[in-house]
Amino acid sequence: MLKGSLFHALGISDDLQLKTFANKTGISVSKLRYYNDSNVFPINSDLDRILINSKLTATQLRLQLGMLNNSILAEIQKNASSIYEIIGEIHESKSKEKYSKVFETSYGNMFKGNCLDLIEDIDNESVDLIFADPPFNLNKKYESGINDFKDETEYLVWTENWVSKCVYLLKEGGSFFVWNLPKWNTHIASILNKYLTFRHWISVDIKYSFPIRNRLYPSHYSLLYYVKGEKPNTFNHQRIPLEICRHCGGDIRDYGGYKDKLNTKGINLSDIWYDIPPVRHSKYKNRNSNELPLKLLERVISMASNEGDLVFDPFGGSGTTYIVSEILKRKWIGIEIGDVSTIQRRFEDIRTQKEYIYDIQQNKNVLFTDRTRKMRSKNGYWLPETLKKATNNR
């Protein structure tokens, strides 16, 4: 049984029907599969052939595929009353699965189950910060035994479901971050644009795949940053140290006559983050699957919330969001559909992670860390105080 919106619209349910339609239209089976599996609307001669042989119009096909352009949306808006009389009120079916609390801490509560069930029971407009790291739909099997692969259409429908439900949880001025591959975040951005205000598309420079022939090397994850309303309730500026040579401590960029104008608290954080290392060291790695770096969550939570604020992450994974929230004294709610024992063990051994977070905080909002200061001083490179001294001696 073949799946997909295009095949459904064309009445194609098996390989024989697909081959028959391909022969009638002169469009290859592989190209028809591409349109169907990738949710891409056919254009030019391919569209003409599909319409002639399906006896559909372009508008009918768009409606059946759910790919509505602005012209169709304008007509729907003009005829909203008539359409409502036909379809009536749409009620989403609620899952009957239940979740259960696994453990609680000084600041948070950890649940096991489907996040959609928990979201239904969290008060609307009660959450200050949402950070979500959903499955990437890569046909990957996790330690829990759960495989994250769905048909692309099914994945996007599921994505819109959890994203739109999370929106209702945010307070006015609350922040919503979504970590995903760029491909999926283009779709998630189109959902969030309907409800929230776009702040940033943050590119985090971590290579997540091997080079692919005839493609650019995928070397960044996408972190979407949205806010409910015109501006965030909380935005704590984050500054990072000046980038220097890790071997000698020398300048990588030539700041010329502007060195004395650099802020001693560090360089303004941009929307491209080069300084987030992947989790590889066994001391901090808690599972074989990829897990979020502590530094990433420390930055997001420090930037977009204050002590006592409520943080929600609907996809627990290895529990990085919850650990950082606990250390930074934020209240938190977490849930994981798979095994939560890894998360629980992390809380039982939180001291090492506290030390790591403390080290991160000691080495931000400064132009040079203590270590780089010593290296630069030893090798004769400038420091703010040496520039000031040189200026005073003129």
Image (cartoon, rainbow, N blue to C red):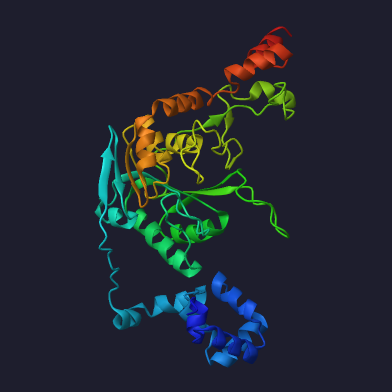
Residue 166 horizontal/vertical position (percent):
36, 54
Give the quarter of the figure containing the C terminus.
Answer: top right
In this view of the protein, can residue 60 be seen by the observer? Answer: no
**Position of residue 99 in the picture relative to residue 281 (left or right):** left
The percent coordinates of residue 365 (x first, y second) are: 53, 26
Where residue 255 appears, as percent x and y from the top left, is 72, 27
Looking at the picture, tell me which residue is in the foreground, 359 or 90: 359
Q: Left or right? Give the position of 76 relative to 379.
A: left
The image shows a total of numbered marks equal to 0
- When asked about the image quadrant of residue 26, the answer is bottom right
Note whether residue 270 is visible. yes
* Percent x, y of residue 215: 70, 58
| Residue at (29, 57) in percent of width and height | 117
> Along the horizontal axis of the image, is 168 left or right of 33?
left
State whether residue 116 is above or below residue 335.
below
From the viewer's side, name the closer residue of 110 and 259: 110
Q: Is residue 305 above or below residue 263?
A: below
Classify residue 119 as left or right of residue 30. Answer: left
Question: Does residue 145 sit above or below 68 in this rendering?
Answer: above
Residue drawn at 48 percent across, 76 percent down: 3
